[in-house]
Amino acid sequence: MNEFNKIKYNNNYNKENYINIQFKIRKDEKPVLLELAKRNGYNTLSSYAKFLLETASDIDSNNKLQN
């Protein structure tokens, strides 16, 4: 009998439900941007970037565009 493989399940779920968005910044900009994120209550650049994108595009918590 196959055992449940949580890592495989999570990887498959993420592949089906999420996309990756990548952008480049200069290495010397990262500490400054990370400090800005932390000052605004975020531990990672990814979480801060997501917040900024959602705010700028008026997406609500249900991923619906505000009118």
Image (cartoon, rainbow, N blue to C red):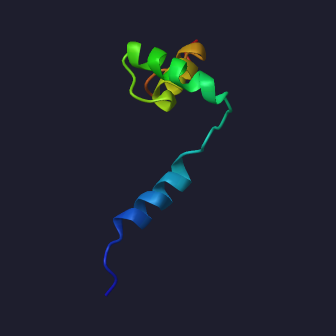
Query: Considering depth in this image, is 2 or 26 the residue closer to the camera?
Result: 26
Residue 59 at least partly seen: no
> In this rendering, does residue 34 appear at all?
yes
Give x and y (percent) for residue 58.
56, 15
Percent of width and height locating residue 8: 43, 66
Residue 16 in the image: above or below residue 24: below
Residue 60, percent from left and from top:
47, 20
> Which picture quadrant has residue 19?
top right
Q: Nearer the viewer, residue 26 or 37?
A: 26
Above or below for 49 versus 20: above
Q: Quadrant of the C terminus?
A: top right
Image label count: 0
Left or right of residue 18: residue 2: left
Q: Nearer the viewer, residue 44 or 3?
A: 44
Which of the 4 image quarters holds residue 66? top right
Name the quarter where the N terminus is drawn. bottom left
Residue at left 47%, top 15%? 36
Q: Residue at x 53, y 18 (%)?
A: 32
Give the residue at x 50% y 28%. 45
Q: Measured from the top left, where is residue 29 in percent x and y? A: 60, 22
